[in-house]
Structure formats: C-alpha cells, structure tokens
Image (cartoon, helix red, strand yellow):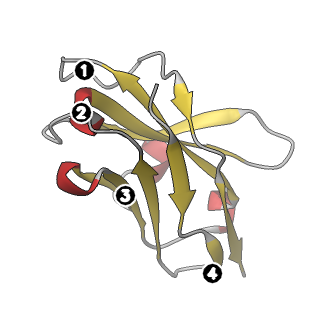
Amino acid sequence: QVQLVESGGGLVQAGGSLRLSCHASGRTFSSYAMAWFRQAPGKERNFVAAISWSGSSTFYADSVKGRLTISRDNAKNTLYLQMNSLELKDTAVYYCAAVRTNTQVVYPLRYDSWGQGTQVTVSS
C-alpha cells in the first residue's frame, strides 16, 4: 500500500480559498486512482472528488461541483484539492485515499489506503 500525508488545511473565511496537498510515498503513484473524502464533526465520512491514475478522468460530489478541483502531479507524487468559494458546510477533516487500478473508473471504488487527514475550518 501507498503511504499518504495530507497538508494545507487551516482556518479560512467563507468565500475564501485553500489548496490541500497529499503526498504519496513510493514510486508507483501513477498506478493509483486517488480521491478526497471529508468528515464533518458528528457525521460520517463522505466522498468529495476522485481522479484517475492518468488524471484524464475526474468525478465530483454534487455539493462541491464548480467550487473544488482535484488534480495530480505524478512526477511529484502529489494529489491536490483546490478549494474556492468555501462555505461553512465545507468545514471538515479532509482525507486523501488511494486504490491501485489500471482503469479510468474512479467512482465508486473501494479505496484502501488513507492518510491521517487535515482540518479545514471555514468561518463566517
């Protein structure tokens, strides 16, 4: 399995932006579909966005379409989540996840490697 470490979380005002990063260990990052999930206090973990191993296929939860953008840089073993027009409801711990696959299908998949998460707090 790949080891994942998220960064970039923090406190931001509503309407602001943040960019989350997730760095993966190992030399096979380009063999993995990657995704972001989030978990708000007292709620279950929910899917946010996913991207194929090549970056050519993406999929988003309806709640974030048009505001959040997932991308990856395979040369840097890094996954990103650009978050714009943040809303109070975006407050959560954000997790990156990975699953080894050679297809362009990214959702639904059983992601089996997880990072520790990074906190995003949106204030009014």
Q: Which residue is mark 1?
A: 105
* Residue type at the position of mark 3: Tyr
Q: Are marks 3 and 4 in contact (CB under 8 Å)?
A: no
Q: Are marks 4 and 1 in contact (CB under 8 Å)?
A: no
Work out how far the residue at label 3 is from the one at label 1, CA to CA, in angstroms: 19 Å
Is any part of residue 96 visible from this angle? yes
State the quadrant of the C terminus.
Answer: bottom right
* Residue type at the position of mark 1: Val
Which residue appears at 31% of the width and 30% of the height?
33
Q: Which residue is mark 2?
A: 52
Work out how far the residue at label 3 is from the one at label 4, CA to CA, in angstroms: 18 Å
Which residue appears at 87% of the width and 42% of the height?
42
CA neighbours of label 1 inside 10 A, class few (<14), some (14 to 19), many (20+) = some
* Residue type at the position of mark 2: Ser
Work out how far the residue at label 1 is from the one at label 2, CA to CA, in angstroms: 7 Å
Q: Is residue 33 left or right of residue 62?
A: left
